[in-house]
Each structure stands twice: as structure tokens, then as C-alpha cells.
Image (cartoon, rainbow, N blue to C red):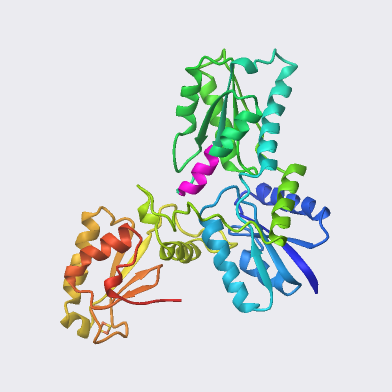
Amino acid sequence: MQQTAILIVGHGSRNQKSNQEFRDLVDRFALSRNELVQCAFIELAEPGLTEALDAAAKKARQILVIPLALFGAGHVKNDIPLAIAEAQLQHPDTIFKAAGPMGLLPELVKLAAKRGREVLDRDQSRRKRTEDHMAVLVIGRGSSDPDANSDFYKVARMIGEALGDPFLVPCFVGVTGPDLESSLELAVKTRPKRIVVIPYFLLQGILISRIHDQVAEFGKAWPHISMSVASYLGVDSLMCDALSFQAEGLVGGKLALPCVSCKYRVPTENVVKNFSALKALLWSQRHRFTHSQAVDHVHSHKPIKKHIFVCTNIDCAEKGGFRTLQSIRRKIKDAGLQNEVAVTRTSCMGKCGEGPAVVVYPDGIWYRELTSEFAGPLITEHIQNDRLFSERVDHIMN
Ligand code: FES
């Protein structure tokens, strides 16, 4: 039995080259360590995190879990802690320690600046360098988590300073704005001779190709401006240094997940719908239902998000089950959610005497005595705001 194992956790991708690049990085990192180093994926590739934690716990007394993640969003805040909590139940004598995200580490800022300089050096032989009139776009994936997006702005600024403080625009590929095209438009207004786009991405993938395509397309309208896309971070000794920093921090008892500004802990204007630990738990539970680990997605790209079951069997019917069913359907329609939320009547759900019984999946929340006047609050609270309609909760499935 080893004293310590390090588990590097990647997201996983349908792009096998990206998964292989992750494995290559882990192999390279392992060369610099004495501990057992293994990899795991949150989804879409194998080994899955649950299996990897179980396997590691059988080989070592202490497991250091390091997410290969730039910023703190759902996977780092929810999925990994939940998997570790489950592994801890299975292996009570094993010590599990998890690191936070890596995006603000100086090693990665340095690496991104290096990628930017590589583009400038590559073009130096072809034309005069024009950094004096250069705009830099640092582009990230984008997240629905304000923690992640605000940390990205900070890191973009640090990359800009490392490159000599050019005109700088942080932007995102998706989920949130500003997007790449509007940021390129903003940049050309400053009349630069050159625009360098630096993707702040760990590994290759479809979004990197999309960035290249968009920049090439945009550049056709501005032939007098040199537009280049730098490499993503990729496998590099600086990346290994960052992983080592995380591992050492865990050994030293540091690197707890920062929670001062976590959206689950601190309700801020416009993001209150994310507030509460229960929301975090629901996110994880739902995510595990909808994105099974290590298998391809089998659903269409726009699957329903929730399924509400309403009991209309004899006992519940006597207590108003049909009116509840109709009211829920009407509220769903009024909210324009009929393509996202299915409502189905059921036979007896074993809650006679406590009806009308209503269950919301995939959250696994059972409601009792949910008569029609509570249909509105149920839809508003649970479906639209992702909070429990606590007044009528019967129980929560494990
Ligand atoms: S009749 Fe509804 S739970 Fe039994």
C-alpha cells in the first residue's frame, strides 16, 4: 500500500485527441513525482471519477484529488466533492483531499503569455513586429458561475500585463458575454496593426477550432490587420509545475476551495437563484442523472429538464389530484416551459392519505398534500428557481 496517490481529474471529451492529450499531461506530470499518479474523467471518458477514487483508495492511504480545471464552477464545486464524499463512505480510513481550480496560478498565466509570445515570434520572420499597435483578446470558455467569470477577468488582466499591457479585451466563447465577434469589433476600433487572440483553455477541443474559424472569418473584412490565434495552454512543463503546486498545497493542508464569493453561499444581485447549499446538491444530483459518467450522451441536444409526476389514483383523486394535474400543466404552459418540463399522471405512488402526491425528477423530490393552489408556488420555486417548495416537501430521495 502506497502512502499517497495523486488523482488528476479532467473533464473528459468526445474528442479522443483531447482525452489523449490529458493522459499525456498526466504521464508527464507523473515523471516528476514519487507518488502514484493516476487520471480520472468527470464524464465522457474512462476511467470515471467514482471508479478511479475507489481504485486509488485500494492502493494508497491518502488521495490527493487535483481537478484539471481553470475555474471554480459546477464540476469543481459539486461533482468532485460529491464523488469524494461517496468514496469516503466506502473507504472511511482513507484520507481524501481536494484542490481548487488552477486558473489563477502564476504558472498558467506565464504559460498563456508564453503562448501569446510564440505567435509574435512565429510571425516575426515574416513581418515587422507591431506590438506597439497591438490588441490582445484573451478568450475563455464562459460559465454561468460568477466566480469563474470574474476570476477569468482577473487572469486576462494578468496575461495582458505580462505581454506589456496592450489594448486588452477579455471575452468568452459561450454561455456569457462579451462574445468573440463583438470583442473583435471593439478591438478594430482602436486601429491596431495586429490582433492576437489567446485562448485560455487547458486542452484542445472543438471550441479551439471554433475560435480559429471565427477569427479567420472576421479577418476577411480587415485584411490590413494581422490577426493570429495563439495556442491553448496544452502540455507544458509550466502546466506540470502548476499541478505540483496544487499537490504540495494539499500536502501542506492548504488550497481549500475558495468560498468567499461562491454563488451557492453568497446571494448577489441577479444570481440569487443559485443561492443555497441545496441548489448545489440538486445541481450535482441532476447532473449525474443527465450526464452519466464515461458514456456518450444518449439524449437529444434539447432534452426535457424535469419530469413531474402527479398521482391521480383513487385516494389522491379524492383530495384533488386531477385539479393539481391541470393546474401544474397550465402553469407550465403559462411559463412557456412545455418543451422543457413533462407532466405525467400516475397511478398510486404509495402515499395514500398524504396526497395529492407529486414527484419531481430528476431531483427526486416528493411533495405531499400538493393541492391545486400550490401548483403556482411549486412551478415558481422548484422549476423556475431551482429551490425546494419546502412547505410541501415530503422527502428527498437519496
Ligand atoms: S393514491 Fe396517490 S399515492 Fe396512493
Dominant SS in magenta:
helix
Above or below residue 261? Residue 198 is above
Above or below residue 64? Residue 122 is above
The answer to whether any part of residue 142 appears in the image is no
Residue 181 image offset from top left, x and y in percent: 47, 28
Residue 174 image offset from top left, x and y in percent: 47, 41
Q: Quadrant of the rendered structure where residue 48 is?
A: bottom right
Q: Quadrant of the rendered structure where residue 34 is?
A: bottom right
Q: Is residue 221 left or right of residue 18?
A: left
Q: Is residue 231 left or right of residue 37?
A: left
Magenta region: 145-153
Question: Which quadrant of the rendered structure holds the N terminus?
Answer: bottom right
Residue 23 image offset from top left, x and y in percent: 72, 53
The answer to whether any part of residue 46 appears in the image is yes
Residue 235 image offset from top left, x and y in percent: 73, 44
Q: Is residue 101 left or right of residue 396?
A: right
Magenta stretch containing residue 151, yes or no? yes
Quadrant location, ligand no. 1: bottom left
Of residues 29 and 98, the one nearer the viewer is 98
Above or below residue 369? Residue 342 is above
Of residues 146 and 282, the one nearer the viewer is 146
Number of marks: 0
Above or below residue 21? Residue 165 is above
Magenta stretch containing residue 18, yes or no? no
Q: What residue appears at the point 46 percent right and 49 percent down from the top-left corner? A: 145
Q: Is residue 123 left or right of residue 217?
A: right
